[in-house]
C-alpha cells in the first residue's frame, strides 16, 4: 500500500520523529528483515549506482525516507541531487542530505559548500566519514571535528556521522590519545549522532562515545527497488529513539571516558527522527566514571612472627600486612634482596645514559685538572 504524502505540519515534526507506515516489500536481492519491531526502512541513493528516477514509486513501495548524496569535497555536487531534492519537496518526502567528507581538504570550506548546496532539504544534515585521505586516522577525526563545528554554526545542529565501527574506533582512539597528550579538550562527537554501517548483523555495534544510532545501514546494494536505477543501500531508523547494539566498543587509548553497557532493543527515550542530531535521545553518550575502591584502613589479623635483629637483640613482631601480602620472617629476605636488586638495576640504567656518562667524565676531568694545578703549586712553593 502506498504511503500518503506528508503534510507540511507533519514535516515540521520529522526532525524528532518519523511517521509510521507500511514496510517496504522485499527487494529481489534478499535484504535483512527489521531486527526489532518499530524500525522503518529507507534507502541511501546517489548518482553513481543508485540514482532516484521516480521518488513517488519509491514512496509507493513503502520506503519511509532516503539519504541522498548532495556534495563531496569543496566543489562536487551529485548529479542527481537537484532532481531528487525537487521530487522530495514536491512529495513532502523526507530527504536526508549527506556530504562525503575529505579530511585532506579544508574542513570549513567543505562545511560552507555543503550548507550552500543542501540547506533546502527537509531533514537534518549528515556527513559520510569513510576515508582518511592518507592522513593518520586520528588526524582525520580531528579534521571531522572541525567540519562538525563549522557546520553547526550554519545548520544550527551537528551533522550525523555515517561511518562503520572499526574505521571509526581506530581514528577516534588515536584522536583521544593525541588530545590527552596535548592537554586539549576533545570534541564531543556524541552531540552529532551516529549513522552506522554494518552488514550481516542482527544489530549494529555502537562505538564510543555514542549510546545508539539514529540510522543503521544494514544491507549494501540491494536490487529491485521501484523508482531506483541501480542498487541503493538499505537503511533502518527507529522513530521511537535510538537503535542500540548488542556490543559496545570502547576507546583503546587510556582516557577518562568510559562506556556504559548498552541496552538491547529500542531505548525508551523521547522520539527521535532519522539523523536528528539535536534530539534529546542523541544529545550525549551515556558515560560512567567509576573509581576503584580505596584500600581498607583495617589490617588483617596478625599471622606468623617476624624476627628482626636490632642492636639490642632479636625482636619478634607479628607479620606486617601490606597491599602485596604479609611480610614475615619467611619472606623478608626476598623483599630485601629484591629491593637491593632494584636499586642496583636503577643505578645501572641511570649510569648507562649518555648524558650521565658525559657528566661523570667532565667531573673526572675537572678533578684531575684541579689536582694537577695543586701539585704544580706545591712544587713552586
Image: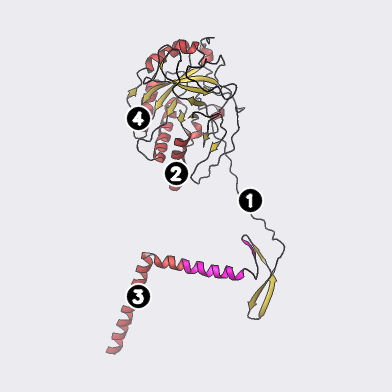
Asked whether disc 4 touches disc 2, contact meaning CB atoms under 8 Å apart, the reply is no
- Residue 205 drawn at (x, y percent): 53, 33
Depth check, front residue: 368 or 334: 334
Q: Is residue 123 found inside the magenta-colored segment of the image?
A: no
Q: Earlier in the sequence, mark 4 or mark 3?
A: 4
Between the C-alphas of marks 4 and 1, the distance is 49 Å
Between the C-alphas of marks 2 and 1, the distance is 28 Å
Q: Secondary structure at mark 4?
A: helix
What residue sits right under mark 1 in the picture?
Answer: 293
Crowd class of label 3 (few under 14; some 14 to 19; many from 20; radius 10 Å): few
What residue sits right under mark 2 in the picture?
Answer: 179
Depth check, front residue: 73 or 12: 73
- Residue 144 drawn at (x, y percent): 41, 34
What residue sits right under mark 4 in the picture?
Answer: 109
Between the C-alphas of marks 2 and 3, the distance is 45 Å
What residue sits right under mark 3 in the picture?
Answer: 364
For residue 362, the mark is none
Q: Earlier in the sequence, mark 2 or mark 3?
A: 2
Q: Quadrant of the C terminus?
A: bottom left
Q: Where are the magenta residues, as a range?
A: 322-345
Asked whether disc 3 touches disc 1, contact meaning CB atoms under 8 Å apart, the reply is no
Q: Earlier in the sequence, mark 3 or mark 1?
A: 1
Q: Secondary structure at mark 1?
A: loop
Q: Quadrant of the N terminus?
A: top right
- Residue 295 drawn at (x, y percent): 64, 55
Q: Residue at x 36, y 29 (%)?
A: 110
Q: Earlier in the sequence, mark 4 or mark 2?
A: 4
Amino acid at each position: 500500500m502506498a504511503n500518503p504524502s506528508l503534510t507540511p505540519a507533519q514535516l515540521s515534526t520529522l526532525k524528532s520523529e518519523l511517521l509510521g507506515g507500511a514496510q517496504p516489500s522485499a527487494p529481489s536481492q534478499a535484504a535483512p528483515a527489521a531486527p526489532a519491531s518499530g524500525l522503518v526502512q529507507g534507502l541511501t541513493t546517489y548518482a553513481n549506482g543508485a540514482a532516484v528516477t521516480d521518488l513517488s514509486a519509491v514512496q509507493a513501495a513503502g520506503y519511509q525516507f532516503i539519504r541522498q548524496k548532495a556534495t563531496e569535497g569543496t566543489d562536487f555536487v551529485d548529479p542527481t541531487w537537484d532532481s531528487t531534492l525537487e521530487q522530495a519537496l514536491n512529495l513532502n518526502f523526507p530527504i536526508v542530505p549527506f556530504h562525503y567528507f575529505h579530511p585532506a581538504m579544508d574542513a570549513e570550506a567543505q562545511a560552507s559548500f555543503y550548507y550552500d548546496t543542501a540547506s533546502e532539504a527537509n531533514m537534518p544534515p549528515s556527513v559520510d566519514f569513510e576515508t582518511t585521505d592518507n592522513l593518520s586516522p586520528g588526524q582525520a577525526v580531528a579534521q571531522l571535528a572541525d567540519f562538525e563545528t563549522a557546520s553547526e554554526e550554519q545548520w544550527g545542529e551537528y551533522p550525523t556521522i555515517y561511518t562503520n565501527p572499526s574505521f571509526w574506533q581506530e581514528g577516534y582512539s588515536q584522536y583521544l590519545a593525541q588530545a590527552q597528550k596535548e592537554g586539549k579538550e576533545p570534541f564531543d562527537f556524541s552531540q552529532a549522532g551516529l549513522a552506522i554501517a554494518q552488514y550481516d548483523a542482527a544489530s549494529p555495534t555502537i562505538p564510543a562515545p555514542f549510546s545508539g544510532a539514529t540510522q543503521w545501514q544494514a544491507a549494501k546494494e540491494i536490487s529491485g527497488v521501484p523508482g531506483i536505477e541501480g542498487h541503493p543501500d538499505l537503511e533502518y531508523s527507529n522513530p521511537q529513539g535510538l537503535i542500540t547494539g548488542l556490543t559496545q566498543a570502547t576507546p583503546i587509548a587510556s582516557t577518562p571516558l568510559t562506556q556504559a553497557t548498552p541496552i538491547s532493543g529500542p531505548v525508551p527515550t523521547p522520539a527521535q527522527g532519522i539523523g536528528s542530531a539535536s534530539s534529546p535521545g542523541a544529545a550525549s553518550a551515556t558515560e560512567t566514571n567509576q573509581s576503584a575502591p580505596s584500600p581498607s584502613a583495617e589490617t588483617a589479623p596478625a599471622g606468623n612472627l617476624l624476627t628482626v635483629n636490632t642492636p639490642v637483640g632479636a625482636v619478634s613482631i607479628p607479620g606486617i600486612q601490606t597491599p602485596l601480602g604479609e611480610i614475615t620472617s619467611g619472606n623478608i629476605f626476598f623483599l630485601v634482596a629484591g629491593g637491593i636488586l632494584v636499586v642496583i638495576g636503577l643505578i645501572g640504567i641511570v649510569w648507562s645514559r649518555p648524558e650521565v656518562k658525559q657528566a661523570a667524565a667532565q667531573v673526572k676531568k675537572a678533578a684531575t685538572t684541579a689536582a694537577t694545578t695543586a701539585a704544580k703549586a706545591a712544587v713552586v712553593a
